[in-house]
Structure formats: structure tokens, C-alpha cells
Amino acid sequence: MSTLNSCLLLSWGLFASGLIILLTRRNILTLLFAILLMFNGMSLAWVASMRFHQQAGDWIGLAALLMVTAAQFLVGLGVLRRIIRSQGSADVSNYHYYKN
């Protein structure tokens, strides 16, 4: 039980730090990393709860979760590359279409 509590506390810390970074920073690369940090916090909580309840197939779920995380990160980097090439900057405050 102590291991589950520590894993959930760590996942809460990852999610909260990602949320704070997401709300306070303006660089789009930092925002993508913050979203990835929040996603990893949720993933850790999910895997810890699966491990605690001894569900079958928890490694298959973890592999699927890691593939989704990698795909999310690669799509985000592709979007970032496209935005920087078209606008010349990675600062979110320069983009007026994000405000609506």
C-alpha cells in the first residue's frame, strides 16, 4: 500500500508541475514538454493502479501507453517545426489565432 501511495504522490507531482509550467510559460516547446509531463503523470497513476490491483495484461497496456506517448510527442514536434518555419518564432504570445 505504501508503494501505491508513493507512486500516486509522484504522479500527482508530475501532473501538477506540468500544469504550473503550462499556465506560466509562453514558449511553445516548453508547453509541449509540459503537456508531455502531465501525460506521464497520468500514465504513472494508471500503471500504479493496474499493478496494485494485479490486473492481467498490465504490460500490454503499458506498451500501448508508451506508444501513444511517443506518437503524441512526435506529432507535437512536427507541429512545432511547422509553426517555427512559418512564423519564425516559438513564442506563443505572437500568435493571435491561439486566443480564440
Image (cartoon, helix red, strand yellow):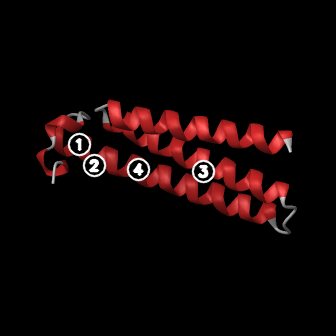
Q: Which residue is mark 3?
A: 42
Q: Kindly state the secondary structure of the residue where label 3 is placed.
A: helix
Q: Kindly state the secondary structure of the residue where label 1 is placed.
A: helix
Determine the residue positioned at 71% across, 59% down: 63
Task: Say if mark 4 contacts mark 2, CB within 8 Å.
Answer: no
- The residues tagged by marks 4 and 1 sit, at their Cα atoms, a distance apart of 14 Å
Instruction: Give the class, few, some or many, for how many residues have Cα within 10 Å of label 2's Cα (few <14, many ≥20).
Output: few
Amino acid type, label 2: Arg
- The residues tagged by marks 4 and 2 sit, at their Cα atoms, a distance apart of 10 Å
- The residues tagged by marks 3 and 2 sit, at their Cα atoms, a distance apart of 28 Å
Q: Counting residues from the N terminus, which is met first, the one under dot 3 or under dot 1?
A: 3
Is the residue 80 above or below the residue 71 in the image? above
Q: Kindly state the secondary structure of the residue where label 2 is placed.
A: helix
Q: Quadrant of the N terminus?
A: top right
Residue 92: which quarter of the image?
Answer: top left
In the displayed structure image, the side of residue 45 where residue 38 appears, left or right: left
Q: Which residue is mark 1?
A: 85
Q: Counting residues from the N terminus, which is met first, the one under dot 4 or under dot 3?
A: 3
Q: Which residue is mark 4?
A: 76
Amino acid type, label 4: Gly
- The residues tagged by marks 1 and 2 sit, at their Cα atoms, a distance apart of 5 Å
Q: Counting residues from the N terminus, which is met first, the one under dot 3 or under dot 2?
A: 3
Task: Say if mark 3 contacts mark 2, CB within 8 Å.
Answer: no
Determine the residue positioned at 21% across, 34% down: 89
